[in-house]
Amino acid sequence: MKKLYAYMSVIMMVLAGFSLTSCEDDDVDRAIDLSGAWTGDMGMFVEVDYRNGSVIYDAIRTDIEFTPHRNYSTHGEGYQVDYYGRDCPYRYTCYYFQWTIDHGRIILRYYDNPDLNATIYDYKLTSSIFDGRIGNTNFRLDKTADYYRWDRYYDDVRWSSYLYIAWDGSYYYDGGYWYDDYYYANSRKNTEAFGDSATSTKPTELPRIIRHGSKYSL
């Protein structure tokens, strides 16, 4: 009987090892699919303060990039740009974040913007489509560039998680930090506003942004 228990213990340990290895392999596969540039709807918004009250504007599109810490890593960094229509006084807002995949969960942690932190459980992720739910919000993203199959370039572009750009090209800066970051070649058109002129505060008459985030946080 003791030998039977010993054999069973060994079998359980082996099975546990297989299960752990399989889970880690699954996370690597997900990270490979996730790494790259995406565009679509993430349910983002900004709330702008006016003299007679505030107005919430929904983003018309989000561009987001996931860059692994190293090849086949299950964590890394990224940036996100939310674009708004001409009814909103701001053209777009930008955020910088860390990401991790842990037992299938995709965890996003935003620098300087902890109210945007999220853990994504319910999703479908392939090499071309990423959709699912964040809280009560549905999202749908399509891949525009693959980290493991693309020609990338390094452009010393500086930007901030608190940089907001108005439709007239002026800048509204509200603290935060500046970063050097990688950009995809096919995203160069989105970075023309991020130049040396953006490194200093430029006074504007724009209404103040009092809240920004995703609809799931409402």
Image: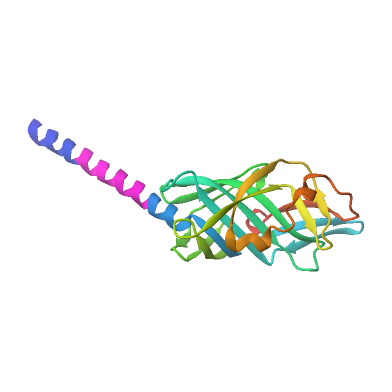
**Is 1 included in the stretch rendered in magenta?**
no
In the displayed structure, 115 sits above or below 185; it is: above
Closer to the camera in the image, 193 or 26: 193
Residue drawn at x 67%, y 63% is 189
In the displayed structure, 95 sits above or below 2; it is: below
Q: How many marks?
A: 0
Image quadrant for the N terminus? top left
Image quadrant for the C terminus? bottom right
The answer to whether any part of residue 130 appears in the image is yes
Left or right, residue 23 beside residue 108: left
Residue drawn at x 66%, y 46% is 115
Closer to the camera in the image, 8 or 73: 73
Magenta stretch secondary structure, dominant: helix
The answer to whether any part of residue 135 appears in the image is no
In the displayed structure, 49 sits above or below 6; it is: below
Left or right, residue 175 beside residue 140: right
Closer to the camera in the image, 211 or 94: 94
Q: Position of residue 212 (x, y in %)?
A: 72, 53
Looking at the rendering, which quadrant does residue 153 occupy?
bottom right
**Is 22 included in the stretch rendered in magenta?**
yes
Which colour scheme appears in the figure? Answer: rainbow
In the displayed structure, 160 sits above or below 187; it is: above
Looking at the image, which residue sits at the far top? 2
Closer to the camera in the image, 180 or 160: 180
Residue drawn at x 84%, y 62% is 168
Left or right, residue 89 beside residue 76: right
Residue drawn at x 69%, y 67% is 60
Q: Position of residue 11 (x, y in %)?
A: 17, 41
Q: Position of residue 104 (x, y in %)?
A: 42, 51
The stretch of residues the image draws in magenta is: 12-26
Q: Position of residue 103 (x, y in %)?
A: 41, 47
